[in-house]
Image (cartoon, rainbow, N blue to C red):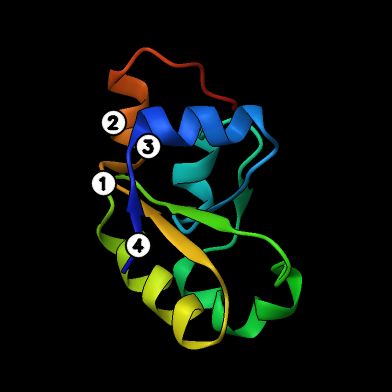
Amino acid sequence: MRETTIDQLAAALDQGAAVIDVREPAEFREGHVPGAINIPMDQLFARLGEVDRDRSVHMVCASGNRSGAMTEVLTANGFDAINVAGGTNAWIRSGRPIEK
């Protein structure tokens, strides 16, 4: 499984990277990486058609565990998926802005 750091994610976002947050909607509303799209873990397989196959997608959750599992699902289905180590919690701890 490919994995990236928070610093690498920040740089990728500056280049227009796609981010999917697999947390539950209530968690997402509490704060998320700017520009992230919320597709909860239990909906991801049914919503694969919403994910762009022509570009890399960064997967994020609270800590990196759920997004790691979903990165493997996407990779097995032919997507270029990258797990964000440390997840949203690490993003927040780094002092970067969040959207609500």
Give the alpha-carbon distance from disc 2 to disc 3, as whole Å: 5 Å
Which residue is disc 1 drawn over? 63
| Front residue (pair 91, 15) | 15
What is the secondary structure assignment of the residue under circle 3?
A: helix
Mark number displayed over residue 2: 4
Which of the two marks, 2 or 4, is nearer to us in this view?
4
Where is residue 68, by image quadrant? Answer: bottom left
Q: Residues within 10 Å of mark 3 (few under 14, many from 20)?
A: many
- Earlier-in-chain disc, 3 versus 4: 4
Dots 2 and 3: beta carbons under 8 Å? yes
Residue 74: image x %, image y %?
Answer: 50, 77
The amino acid pointed to by label 3 is Thr
- Asked if residue 26 can be seen in this view, the reply is yes
Tell me where residue 87 appears, x and y as whole percent: 33, 42
Of callouts 2 and 4, which one flags the residue occurring earlier in the amino acid sequence?
A: 4
Kindly report the distance in space between the C-alpha atoms of the residues bearing marks 1 and 3: 6 Å
* Front residue of 22 and 57: 57
Q: Which numbered marker is on residue 88? A: 3
How crowded is the residue under tag 4: few (<14 C-alpha within 10 Å), some, or many (20+)? some
Determine the secondary structure under disc 4.
loop
